Amino acid sequence: MGRRVAVTRAETQLGAARRLFMAAGAEVVDLPALVVTPPDSWGPLDDALAELEDFHWLVFSSANGVEAVEHRLLRLGRRLAHRPGGLKIAAVGRKTAARLEELGAPADFVPPAFVADSLLEHFPVSGWGLRLLIPRVQSGGRTLLAEAFAAAGARVVEVPAYETRCPQGLPSAALAALQQEQLDAITFSSGKTVSHTLQLLQAAYGSDWQARLRPLAIVSIGPQTSERCRSCLGRVDAEADPHDLAGLVQACARALEGRPLRAPR
């Protein structure tokens, strides 16, 4: 690739993205745009986990949700790997499924495309009469899964399992790269990374924040993130397909193909 790319991820999740971009020949500038924290209250999740035997499916849409559930189960002396025999697990996304594998609790169903809509389209059984538990981000996440399953006759319990908040500011390396126009592209892996990056840029540059992104290719991991890019940033130059980190790297390469190098070497 031979380009300098800003990667916006959670502070604790930059490593995997960095490795993939570097393997493709990119120079990576970390731009942490999320801080993963506990929800305001563990009560709803703990109450649901205490009744885990009463659910038919546990539906994860992120690895953060997997981590939160495993963390709370361990407090009860339990693990996802030793879940009730009648409980099946569905996972949206390669990373979510991989984390479940690592915990010894492989998903029973992973949709072919790494988006919630694909899970709904390809879910292996009718939702009628099922009881589903959906751990999700406290704010800013989509309620599509819960609404669609409920409309299909399922009894859905949707609980906050974690929250993603905005960091206090941009790291100095990212500020310098933006200020000196040393970036070729910026990638986004969720709607919140878009919103938080906008907030961070406004705090750093005021009304001049848009000028920092104007020369850059804007690359999104999937449809919902692209929608947020358009509404907040006015455009998106490429979208990953498949909607995962490997697809994001490929989309970035496509977006930069033929573009002149922006970053001084």
Image (spheres, rainbow, N blue to C red):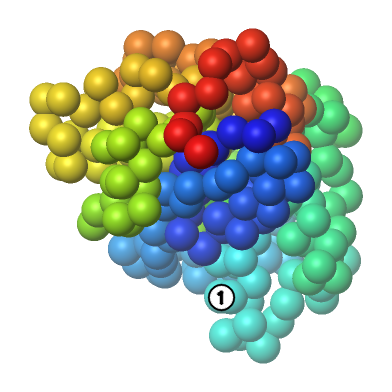
Pick the front one: 19 or 197: 19
| Image location (x, y in percent) of residue 245 | 69, 40
Is residue 66 visible in the rendered structure shown here?
yes
Q: To which quarter of the image does residue 14 belong?
A: bottom right
Q: To which quarter of the image does residue 205 belong?
A: top left
Is residue 160 visible in the rendered structure shown here?
no
| Image location (x, y in percent) of residue 145 | 60, 32
Residue occupying the point 63% across, 82% down? 74
The number of numbered discs placed on residues in the rendered structure image is 1
Task: Please indicate whether residue 129 sits to the left or right of residue 192 in the image.
Answer: right
| Image location (x, y in percent) of residue 197 | 33, 38
147 w.r.t. 171: above or below: above
Residue at the extreme left of the image, as rendered? 206
Pick the front one: 139 or 9: 9
| Residue type, numbered disc 1 | Arg
Q: Secondary structure at mark 1?
A: helix
Disc 1 crowd rating (10 Å Cα; few below 14, some 14-19, many 20+) is: some
Pick the front one: 97 or 28: 28
Residue occupying the point 48% across, 48% down? 29
| Image location (x, y in percent) of residue 163 | 40, 55
Residue occupying the point 81% across, 33% down? 111
**Image quarter (top left, top right, bottom left or bottom right) of the N terminus:** top right
Task: Please indicate whether residue 105 sits to the left or right of residue 219 in the image.
Answer: right
Task: Please indicate whether residue 192 sits to the left or right of residue 62 in the image.
Answer: left
Residue under pointer 1: 72
